[in-house]
Amino acid sequence: MNIALWVAAGLLAAGFLFSGLLKILTPREKLAQRMAWASDFSQGQIRGIGAVELLGAIGVIVPGITKIAPILVPIAATGLALVMIGASVTHIRRKEYSELASNVVLFALAVFVAWGRFGPYPL
């Protein structure tokens, strides 16, 4: 089970690292061409979301590898699950139902890591 939790954390980190960097580095207008929801948010809000995603990606991996404050792993996973709830609400509000699948998958991975690391398989 420990291996499955590491794989899930790695997938979360990869997805949110890419997504977070994209939101931080891409201007809002260009991002809105690929992600319609971006037109509802300011550049600062989008960068804030990107920063949270980037910190979450770091948080689900680095504390576990370094053994420094490993309690941060399930906390970061919980934070990423909350981000996915917010993303889902935004997509539902905008009637972008086709975007929900990735939100649900990332939410499930984050909940799995949080459950495992808070519960029966702590680091």
Image: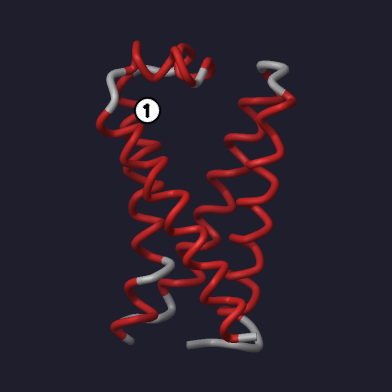
Q: Quadrant of the rendered structure where residue 66 is?
A: bottom left
Q: Total number of numbered labels?
A: 1
Disc 1: CA contacts within 10 A as few (<14), some (14-19) or many (>=20)? many
| SS label for mark 1 | helix
Percent x, y for residue 59? 38, 65
Percent x, y for residue 38? 46, 19
Percent x, y for residue 11? 51, 60
* Residue furthest left in the image: 25
Residue 54's place in the image compared with 22, above or below, is below
The quarter of the image holding the N terminus is bottom right
The residue that appears at 63% across and 78% down in the rendered structure is 116
Residue 20's place in the image compared with 112, above or below, is above
The residue that appears at 54% across and 87% down in the rendered structure is 122
For the residue pair 99 and 77, the one nearer the viewer reads as 99
**Residue, disc 1:** 46
Tag 1: amino acid: Ile
Q: Quadrant of the rendered structure where residue 73 is?
A: bottom left
